[in-house]
Amino acid sequence: MKRGHVNDAGRYLARYRFFFDWLRYRDDDRSFDSLRDLVREFVWTNFPVAKGAKVLGQECPRQFVHSLSTAVTKTGITKRQLGRRLCALGLARQSGGELGFDIHDYIADEVIIKIASEFSGVVNATEAAAF
């Protein structure tokens, strides 16, 4: 269900609403706790859920994956630069769409941290001209 919808605006709740409603209807039933734990872990690790956002009653401990937009916000790298780097890594492709890039899957936080560290050592044009 997740595959093929990475760049759409809808996140996990929009796609799995019926299932989440069904699961919430059973909030008082402890026999569903293990299922809720599995679903919660799946959502945290497969969708760009912000740290502290609640999924099935528990806060997400950290953001595990990013969309292109959340990665841009976290790193401060422009969408174009980040998109080109992701294309070079084989994690995205250029498109004529709204974002200019289509990512193949949400991007792992570790990849975003690595890319951000690579960019932190790069001097921008203004700094280079001043140097």
Image: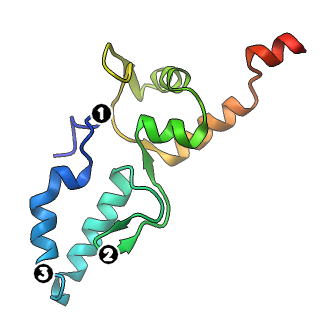
Residue contact at pointers 1 and 3, CB within 8 angstroms = no
User: Which badge, 1 or 2, comes first in the chain's sequence?
Assistant: 1
| Disc 3: which residue | 26
As drawn, which residue projects farthest toward the top? Answer: 129
Q: Is residue 8 left or right of residue 69?
A: left
Q: Is residue 23 above or below residue 93?
A: below
Residue 127 drawn above or below residue 32: above
Query: How many angstroms separate mark 1 from mark 2 (CA)?
Result: 26 Å
Q: Position of residue 61 (x, y in %)?
A: 48, 67
Q: Secondary structure at mark 1?
A: loop
- Residue matched to label 1: 7
Q: What's the residue at 33%, 51% (across, down)?
A: 46
* Earlier sequence position, callout 1 versus callout 3: 1
Give residue 77's position: percent from left, percent from top: 59, 30
Q: Position of residue 1 (x, y in %)?
A: 15, 46
- Along the line of sight, which residue is nearer the eye, 102 or 114? 102
Q: Position of residue 75 (x, y in %)?
A: 59, 39
Residue 62 marker: none
Q: Residue at x 50, y 61 (%)?
A: 62
Q: Residue at x 21, y 45 (%)?
A: 2
Quadrant of the rendering where the C terminus is positioned: top right
Q: Amino acid at mark 3?
A: Arg
Q: CA distance from mark 1 to mark 3?
A: 31 Å
In 3D space, how far apart are the residues under numbered discs 3 and 2 (Cα atoms)? 13 Å
Q: Secondary structure at mark 3?
A: loop
Amino acid type, residue under disc 1 in the picture: Asn
Outermost residue to the right: 131
Q: Which residue is mark 2?
A: 57
**Labels 1 & 2 near each other (Cβ < 8 A):** no
